[in-house]
Amino acid sequence: MDEEKCAQCGTPAAPGAKFCESCGAPMAAASQPVEGPAMAEPAPSYMPSAEMSYQGVAIRFVAFLIDYIILGIISWILVAVFAVSAISVDTSTGAVSIGAAYYAVIVLVILLELLYFTLLLGHYGQTVGMMAVKIKVVREADSGPITYGAAFIRTILLLIDEIPYVIPYLLGAVLIWTSDKKQRLGDRLAHTVVVKA
């Protein structure tokens, strides 16, 4: 077997040497890639997500029911403590008078509901009811967390979704049933979807 020589100066090289001992030039064998199993290409940094599992009326109704039980208990306590004392009945005439505290409690209950949905959805993407049934609200475009603005839009538009009020949320249910992404009006305008958590 021929002894390997430096291509630069012709000096014989030690076996397995990577550089010539005389001139420091790289040896030809060292500059060639070592043959072996092909190295696996690195996985792309972006992996497209699997198709999202949009959540329909039934599971969302259960989450909403849990939320309204929580809000109902809080509202009942507020009414019992503050509003009842604001209602008085004149025993001689039977006239009922309602004080300002009653209306203040009504406004407080509405604000409580608005804050409950907006703050929880804006911060966690879930209300307590949604956490219980393991669903969440995300951005339609990229499945990222929603903003407080989007949460506020969804919450305000619950008033529209409640139509007709004799059968609450019938309009919202119809919109979810007829949407490919199962979006109610609030979802469509806020560009959000409800998916599995």
Image: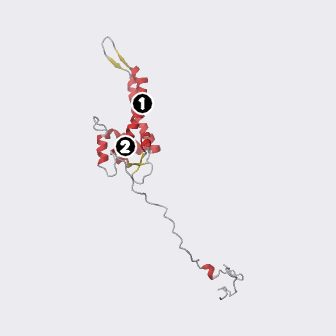
Q: Which mark is residue 32?
A: none
The three-letter amino acid code for the residue at tag 1 is Ile
Image check: 56 left or right of 7?
A: left
Rendering quarter of residue 20: bottom right
The answer to whether residue 108 is seen in the rendering is no
> Which sits earlier in the primary sequence, circle 2 or circle 1?
2
Callout 2: helix, strand or loop?
helix
Q: Is residue 9 above or below residue 51?
A: below
Decide: few, some or many residues near mark 1? Use Cα within 10 Å; few <14, some 14-19, many ≥20: few
The three-letter amino acid code for the residue at tag 2 is Arg
Q: Which residue is mark 1?
A: 73
**In front of the other: 153 or 38:** 38
Q: Is residue 46 above or below residue 98?
A: below
Residue depicted at 39% across the width and 56% down the height: 51
Q: Which residue is mark 2?
A: 60
Residue depicted at 33% across the width and 38% down the height: 159
The image position of residue 60, as x and y in percent, is: 37, 43
